[in-house]
Image (tube, helix red, strand yellow):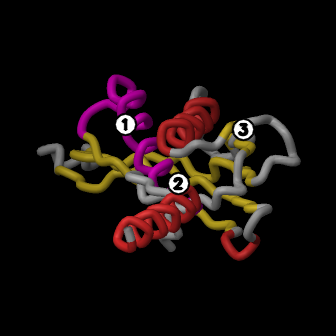
């Protein structure tokens, strides 16, 4: 009888403590009181503009939050957390150059690099010590003409950027 009473007491303690614990396979550490997040459109303020980038990046960040958290994404300044920012850099530059073989012709780019920088402001209304504002930059190297590869390169960079931003906001990776 005594063993059974001890077992029931231990079970009661376990049942009372488990609901306050949370497990996340994404590495996210989101307090239970945080329920909503607002992700504003990231305007494209870069000198060189890729038309769909603003919408694609914003949706990519929302998709990551939807798939890896329990947070509801709402359009409301009263949300528990808020992402705002802008695209500040979209550039294409040569990373390696090859000679053309003639004396008068200038060298040509053998490989180029696409660089995208997003300046992000994150406000966590439940825990202000997690607030930040910082730029996030990612690159992708490519050969040949960008027009055939641009959509794919931008998609790859968006995945990397949203992972970096998500980890900074929710996994406390500085």
Q: Say which residue label 2 marks.
A: 166
Query: Is residue 173 or residue 148 the one in the foreground?
Result: 173
Tell me if residue 20 comes above or below residue 54 in the rendering: below
Q: Say which residue label 3 marks.
A: 41
| Dominant SS in magenta | helix
Tell me if residue 149 comes above or below residue 127 in the rendering: above
x 39%, y 67%: residue:
7
Could you say whether the residue bearing mark 3 is in a helix, strand or loop?
loop
Segment colored magenta: 143-170
Question: Left or right of 62: which side holds 74?
Answer: right
Query: Is residue 129 or residue 47 the one in the foreground?
Result: 129
Q: CA distance from mark 1 to mark 2?
A: 20 Å
Tell me if residue 124 comes above or below residue 6 in the rendering: above
Q: Say which residue label 1 marks.
A: 153
Residues at circles 2 and 3 in contact by the CB criterion of under 8 Å: no
Q: Place residue 33 in its image quadrant.
A: bottom right
Q: Position of residue 91 (x, y in %)?
A: 49, 48
Query: Is residue 127 or residue 133 the one in the foreground?
Result: 127
x 55%, y 37%: residue:
66
């Amino acid at each position: 009888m005594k063993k059974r009473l001890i077992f029931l007491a231990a079970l009661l303690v376990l049942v009372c403590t488990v609901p306050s614990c949370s497990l996340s396979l994404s590495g996210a550490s989101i307090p239970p009181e945080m329920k909503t997040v607002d992700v504003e459109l990231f305007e494209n303020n870069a000198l060189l503009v890729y038309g769909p980038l603003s919408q694609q990046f914003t949706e990519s960040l929302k998709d990551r939050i939807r798939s890896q958290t329990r947070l509801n994404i709402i359009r409301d300044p009263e949300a528990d957390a808020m992402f705002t920012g802008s695209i500040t850099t979209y550039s294409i530059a040569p990373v390696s150059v090859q000679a053309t073989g003639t004396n008068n012709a200038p060298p040509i780019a053998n490989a180029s690099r696409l660089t995208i920088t997003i300046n992000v402001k994150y406000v966590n209304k439940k825990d202000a010590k997690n607030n930040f504002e910082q730029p996030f930059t990612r690159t992708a190297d490519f050969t040949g003409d960008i027009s055939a590869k641009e959509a794919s390169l931008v998609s790859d960079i968006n995945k990397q950027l949203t992972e970096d931003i998500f980890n900074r906001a929710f996994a406390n990776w500085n």
